[in-house]
Amino acid sequence: MTANDVRRSELADNLAAVRERIDAATRAAGRTDEVALTVVTKFFPADDVAALASLGVVDVGENRHQEAEGKHAACLEAGVGGLRWHFIGGLQSNKAAAVARWADVVESIDRPKLVGALDRGAAERDAPLDVLLQVSLDPPGRDQRAGVEAADLAGLAARVEAAEHLRLRGLMAVAPLGEEPEPAFGRLATIRSEFLADHPGADLLSAGMSGDLEAAIAHGATHVRVGTAVLGSRPGVQ
Ligand SMILES: *Cc1c(COP(=O)(O)O)cnc(C)c1O
């Protein structure tokens, strides 16, 4: 076997194990809908993205514009098609228009300033850009991770609805550090049910990672974002 074959079979095994975890969690939650898997490929090379595509992966997630733009171009060049690229990282407004050029879904809108910048970038696309609003699950006064406060969610959603080239598809969240994911995703489910009353069509919920996907699925996640459990430890990251 070549090194490529070895890597591909490792990815295939990891994917099968993650898909099994997702299925088990979906059943345990008494759900009959399907939970989609976004494989987070940040820090890993375009070759891995190509191998994942050949294994049936459609959704891939990236968190840095420059790295992702390069991989997106490399995949196109190599004829790797059919992928949906999710931007899941902190977004600077001066990069937003550039992200709108290669991303199919932007999951991390957390402030009004990004809406206009993304909308201007998305104007050059053939189709509207799908977006999610990133909700903060940090207890008040302790915001370590990005996200809009629940109190400001309705206002941010209204801005996206008013943007001509953006399509509001739902919410995204990351469990806070140093807290059990269960109660955090419980809060998320409450925030989401209020949000859905105003935006019934925006019913995607991106939540859950390698360590906490079961808790997220129990609380209604429609998409989980999994990196480490599929690709292994990220190079240069503990
Ligand atoms: C890196 C990352 C993930 C994947 O995390 P793993 O623990 O490696 O599965 C998910 N969501 C976001 C926002 C990330 O930045």
Image (tube, helix red, strand yellow):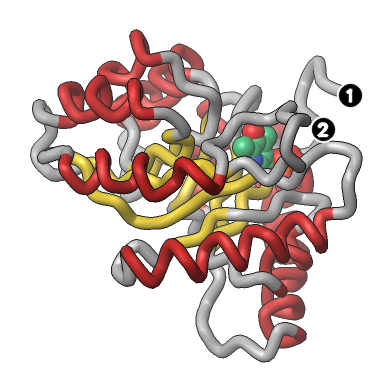
**205 or 2, which is in the foreground?**
205
- Disc 2 target residue: 233
Quadrant in which residue 103 is drawn: top left
Residue 200 percent across, percent down from the top left? 33, 71
Q: Mark 1 points at which residue?
A: 238
Q: Is mark 2 on a helix, strand or loop?
A: loop
Q: Is mark 1 within 8 Å of ligand 1?
A: no
Q: How far apart are marks 2 and 1 (CA)?
A: 7 Å
Q: Which residue is drawn at 74% across and 46% down?
A: 175
Q: How crowded is mark 2: few (under 14 residues within 10 Å), some or many (20 or more)?
A: few
Measuring from the top left, give residue 2's x and y in whole percent: 70, 36
Q: Look at the numbered discs 2 and 1 and tell me whether their residues touch, using CB distance below 8 Å.
A: yes
Task: Give the tally of numbered discs.
Answer: 2
Instruction: Report helix, strand or loop for mark 1.
Output: loop
Q: Residue at x 82, y 62 (%)?
A: 182
Q: Where 234 sits versus 223, above or below? A: above
